[in-house]
Image (spheres, grey):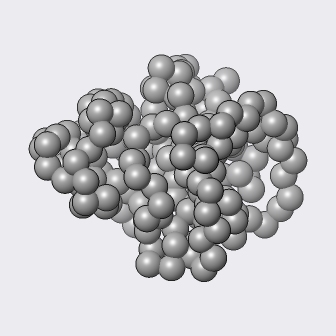
Amino acid sequence: MRKLIAGMKISVDGKVEGPEGMADWVKAWSEDYGLTGQIDACVVGGGMYPGYEGYWTGIKNEPDKPAWITGSGPTPAEKEWARFAARTPHYVLSSTLTSALWPNTSFVRGLEEIAALKQQPGKDIYLIGGARTAASLIDAGLVDELRLIVYPLIAGTGKALFATMEGRRGLELRKALPLPDGCVSLIYGIS
């Protein structure tokens, strides 16, 4: 069975967004979890998908133009992810969205469709987010692994990654790695 792996960038206090609705502490949105060679599909929540699709399409089509989220030019790793994302199937969990610009985008309406996707042949699946989608899939027992990059700041108010979690989940630390600028990469198995 394919694994569903969530990868999120958070503050020390577990926030994925600050009070302005952005994670302004994240300097680049590249796939920094070491997943690219291991995955062949992505899952994204419907609330996040339109901005996600626009952001990565912009980088792919105009790789030298500053990105709208960061205001800076894309990093080499962001350019690489933009090319990978454009050719990789994406499954959008949404009860309302019905169209996408990317031809490799499909819409899934319920958690049972995500469970069925895990049963299909292929590599692992990257759960990109957002926070509500990640929490609901963890609650449903569908997420096998959680990869976090923890930034060295306390965001205070903002959107917490686990704010909508209903149940308790045990985590098994598989790897911890210090990163530049005081960040830490954590990989957990979810039980």
140 relative to 6 in the view: left or right: right
68 relative to 92 in the view: left or right: left
Q: Quadrant of the N terminus?
A: top right
38 relative to 64 in the view: left or right: right
Which residue lies at the image location 68% right of the left edge and 33% below the top edge? Answer: 177
Q: Quadrant of the C terminus?
A: top right
Which residue lies at the image location 64% right of the left edge and 30% below the top edge? Answer: 3
Residue 168 falls in image quadrant: bottom right
Q: Is residue 80 above or below residue 191?
A: above
Q: Give the x, y percent position of residue 77.
A: 35, 33
Most foreground residue, 158 or 134: 158
Most foreground residue, 98 or 60: 60
- Is residue 92 visible in the rendered structure shown here? no
- Is residue 75 visible in the rendered structure shown here? yes
Q: Give the x, y percent position of residue 91.
A: 43, 44
Residue 131 falls in image quadrant: bottom right
Q: Give the x, y percent position of residue 65.
A: 14, 49
Which residue lies at the image location 40% right of the left edge and 47% below the top edge? Answer: 29
Most foreground residue, 157 or 106: 157
Which residue lies at the image location 71% right of the left edge and 51% below the top edge? Answer: 138
Q: Is residue 160 above or below residue 41?
A: below
Most foreground residue, 22 or 108: 22
Residue 151 falls in image quadrant: bottom right
The residue lying furthest to the front in this view is: 181
Q: How many marks?
A: 0
